[in-house]
Image (cartoon, rainbow, N blue to C red):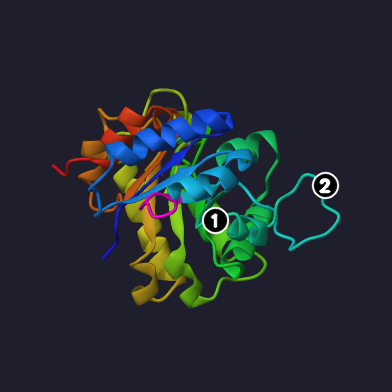
Amino acid sequence: MRIPLIAGNWKMNNLIHQGVELVLKLRELTKGVNEVEIVVAPPFTSLYHLKFLLAGSPIKLAAQNLFWEKSGAYTGEVSAGMLKDVGCEYVIIGHSERRQYFHETEDAVNKKLLAAIGAGIKPIVCVGETLEERESGKTLEIVKFHVEKALTGKTGLAQGAIKDLTIAYEPVWAIGTGVNATPEEAEEVHNYIRELLFELFETNHAKDVRIIYGGSVKPSNIDSLMAQPNIDGALVGGACLKAEDFARIVKFQRA
Ligand code: PEP
């Protein structure tokens, strides 16, 4: 059974006091929700403070990035162990903004994934095509490339290690644009990713991997997205910055 996962990616938004305000509201608005896993991914600067605020609450903490080495002379980087230390249960890896602005490669995504798993942090790995790739009919090819490289890469992932993995299908053209993939478009890709996982891993492990959708998710489209059999949750950007909107997404209604 896959428990739905709704994660909010704050990106580079919110000073500490703003994050505190958002999380306090969110805690209140999502009281009593226990059949959905709720995750917030604030900037690094807020993690320590929010760890204490979220203690005893079902809302979990994620980081938006990590570096794969354990420690050392890597100015500006943060390791998986440090994320664990500051209370992160999840980490987002390979977001398209990191691939675009920070030149994150497939190899880097693979190393980050392995480092996260090695430190006991659950990775949310982002994959997805650009508009140009979709328009030239390459969506499934790109997604296959991203998934295979992230999971098998140079150093393969052990069978059992995928139990804590989440894959976020995030078509790049849908991120921050207000235009989401239709539930049918998303389902086609999610179903394809599920089949890929069955090819790469044993069925009893692959069936439990959550595949969540990201790209202009909002209160008005979450219900129809979650009605699809292979959509196990959402990675939410813009709409997670408003507690009311994010709470409504968390409280999606299955059609
Ligand atoms: C994201 O950044 O992961 C995202 C899905 O953003 P938005 O919801 O704003 O499209």
Circle 2 SS class = loop
Quote the CA–CA distance across marks 2 and 1: 22 Å
Amino acid type, callout 1: Gly
Please state, as top left, top right, bottom left or bottom right, where the C terminus lies in the image.
top left
Main secondary structure along the magenta-highlighted residues = loop
Residue 6 can be seen in this image: yes
Mark 2 vs mark 1: which is more N-terminal? 2
> Where is 194 relative to 159, above or below?
above
2 vs 1, front mark: 1
> Where is 117 relative to 173, above or below?
below
> Where is 145 relative to 159, above or below?
above
Q: Please tell me how crowded label 1 is: few (under 14), some (14-19), or many (20+) other residues with Cα within 10 Å.
A: many
Image mark count: 2
The yes-or-no answer for disc 1 within 8 Å of ligand 1 is no
Residue range corresponding to the magenta coloring: 55-60
Circle 1 SS class = loop
Which residue extends farthest right? 73
Q: Position of residue 116 (x, y in %)?
A: 59, 62
45 left or right, relative to 36? right
Residue 184 can be seen in this image: no
Residue closest to the eye, 218 or 182? 218
Amino acid type, callout 2: Thr
Please state, as top left, top right, bottom left or bottom right, where the N terminus lies in the image.
bottom left
Q: Which residue is mark 1?
A: 87
Which residue extends farthest top? 178
Residue occupying image coordinates x 58% and y 29%: 15
* Mark seen at residue 206: none
Q: Which residue is mark 2?
A: 75
Q: Position of residue 250 (x, y in %)?
A: 29, 41
61 left or right, relative to 217? right
Q: Position of residue 3 (x, y in %)?
A: 29, 58
